[in-house]
Image: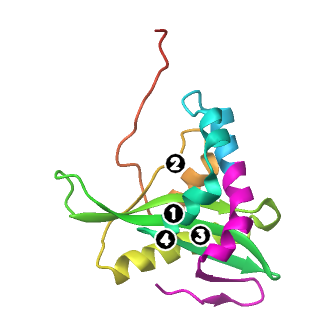
Amino acid sequence: MSIEREKPNIFTTREMVADDIAAVLPMLHESWLENTENSETVSEEFFEKTNSAEWLEGFLANEGHGVVAEMNGEIAGAILFQIETSPEYYVTERHLMVMDVVVDAEYRRLGIATQLEKEAEDFARENNISLVLGEVWAYNEKSKRLMKELGRHPLYVVYGKMVDE
């Protein structure tokens, strides 16, 4: 992974470690809460009952990877990703799935999310993976713009509707 890269006078990136979890969780919670507020399919109760610190610790200890961006001695953002086996109909056997990208509100518009996404792409290249995927909620216009800027495009769209039982 090409971490430890520095953008002059702005921020640095490095591999995420267990000690970073406490700083990353509030950003993840904010993002997850935004999903529950903007989608009828996301369960707020799930996030309330899930021990997210335990989940993130397990994710990093197993097959998950993370990179954090630091600025002014604080963690300003993070990206979480993992290598997954691709479905048979994909042209690649494996792909890199970006699970979450978060940036603290105080540090937005500095290129942090872009750099974190590029770190994930570098990780993919270093592991001979040619496909990077990530899910973006339909309401999230900022993330959709970022994906377009990175040269990514929608591969398929999932439509949903809650129906009465």
Residue span colored magenta: 1-30
Q: Is residue 161 visible?
A: yes
**As drawn, is 23 to the left or to the right of 101?**
right
**As drawn, is 126 to the left or to the right of 75?**
left
**Given the image, on which type of amino acid does mark 4 rest?**
Ala
Q: Position of residue 34 (x, y in %)?
A: 69, 42
Are circles 2 and 3 on residues that touch, CB within 8 Å? no
**Residue behind mark 1:** 58
Work out which residue is located at the far top of the displayed protein and give it. 165
**Residue behind mark 4:** 61
Q: Which mark is residue 20?
A: none
N-terminal of the two: label 2 or label 4? 4
**Residue behind mark 3:** 114
N-terminal of the two: label 2 or label 3? 3
Are circles 3 and 1 on residues that touch, CB within 8 Å? no
Are circles 2 and 4 on residues that touch, CB within 8 Å? no
